[in-house]
Amino acid sequence: MKNTINLAVLGLGTVGTGVLNLIKDNAKELARRSGHHLKVTYAGTRRQRDDIDPTIRQTDDLMAIAAASDVDIIIEVIGGTDIAYEVITHAIRHKKHIVTANKALLAKHGNEIFRLAEEHGVQVRYEAAVAGGIPIIKVVREALAANKIDWLTGIINGTGNFIMSEMQQKNRKFDEVLAEAQALGYAEADPTFDVEGIDAAHKLSLLASIAFGIPVQFDKVYCEGITKINLQDVIYAKDLGYTIKHLGFAIRRDEGIELRVHPALIPADALLANVNGVKNAVMIDAHPLGQSLYYGDGAGAGATASAVMADVMDLIYVIKAATPSDVPHLAFIPEELSDTRILSSDEMTCGYYLRLTVKDELGVLASATRILSDNGINIDAILQRDAHKSGLVPIIILTLPVVEKQMNAAIAQIEALAAVTEPVVRIRLESLD
């Protein structure tokens, strides 16, 4: 006879409701795979729902649920950091395993939460916190456990990717596409976390930790959003054979680790360049495997519920085996986490797309290229457009990889030229080799 595993779902928004529906719809398959019946005993909600199974006790007393004796696994999908932190730590102290989709919480408090879980012999699982339905956490923590990961990069925010895809494919302006994303429910009324790169930076800090065996360090991620991307630059990038994508990068270098989120020009024929709409994708370069790509839905009720329940199924095996833990929370055993230095933004290395707006005068291009050369920056390509009616000329320059500090110095000198009428637009350029 199968035993029962009791679950509590905290939060009945899109994801929480999706989890309940998945458990109901796939009950037989879940039981066949796990050898246990799954029963939701509590739902944490501020508003009573008539469409929820009446055997599930609905309450807004989340702390009581966290301590309840008839709960084995807490599923936290309420979001935010303050209340979620209090509830999760309370649940851990009461020996509850945790499944969470809360990347902001783990980016801010993950190190502390994982230590607490180890002390109390329980697990915190967070597959749904990064890239929705793509099982990227399991891939990095387990499937690639024998590999040394050199770098990873990816499209890890669906809203930003939808906006950049529409701008790229249909020559639409940022504000127009953002309004549509909000109307479609892809973007919140306050889209700051998505369009300023904060959401992607949360996710990148978690991926970098399990890839390189370092503590979660969200505060050291360089973060730049897409709000300043101009349609003009999208068009110029296409003319040069590139696509602009909003990407996260975690790169192992001799001097330390680069953690950065920002728009980037990538070759138009690259796999990531062809990931469009609200889809997510993560590319990993590891030894000895080489490069691999993981693609799928990065958000939504179905994708996120799938990731949540994958974690629940793993925890059932842990409970069944009566082991306090299995795979370490951050992929490496806690005492082996490295204090490898995270590089500052001045130390980052990449190529650049530069757009100069200049007066139509002789010698301007020569002056700009001389400044780049004096700062040790090699030019890969130059595109000069016809003068606007205003008499101003756009000049596009692509550079080879350079340390950011050198580029900052060169841009300051270029902007000081009398013929340069506007701040230099720069977008990082990546070959993805």
Image: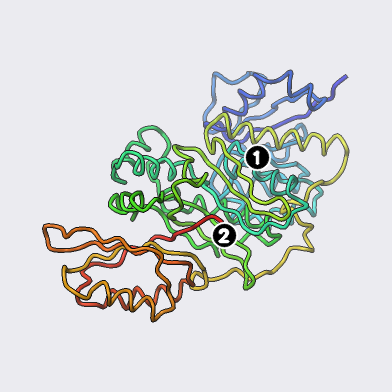
Horizontal side of residue 105 vs 93, given as left or right? left
- Relative to 124, say whether 1 is above or below: above
Q: Is residue 366 visible?
A: yes
**Residue kind at label 1, given as amino acid type:** Pro
Q: What numbered label is drawn on residue 38?
A: none
Residue 278 horizontal/vertical position (percent): 47, 37
Q: Which residue is mark 2?
A: 218
Horizontal side of residue 47 vs 27, given as left or right? left
Q: Give the structural element (helix, strand or loop) at label 2.
A: helix
Residue 66 horizontal/vertical position (percent): 69, 40
Q: What numbered label is drawn on residue 135?
A: 1
Q: Nearer the viewer, residue 286 or 262?
A: 286
Q: Is residue 60 visible?
A: no
- Dot 2 alpha-carbon crowd within 10 angstroms: few under 14, some 14 to 19, many 20 or more: many
Horizontal side of residue 354 vs 364, given as left or right? right
Residue that appears at 66% across and 20% down = 24
**Is label 1 or label 2 in front?**
1
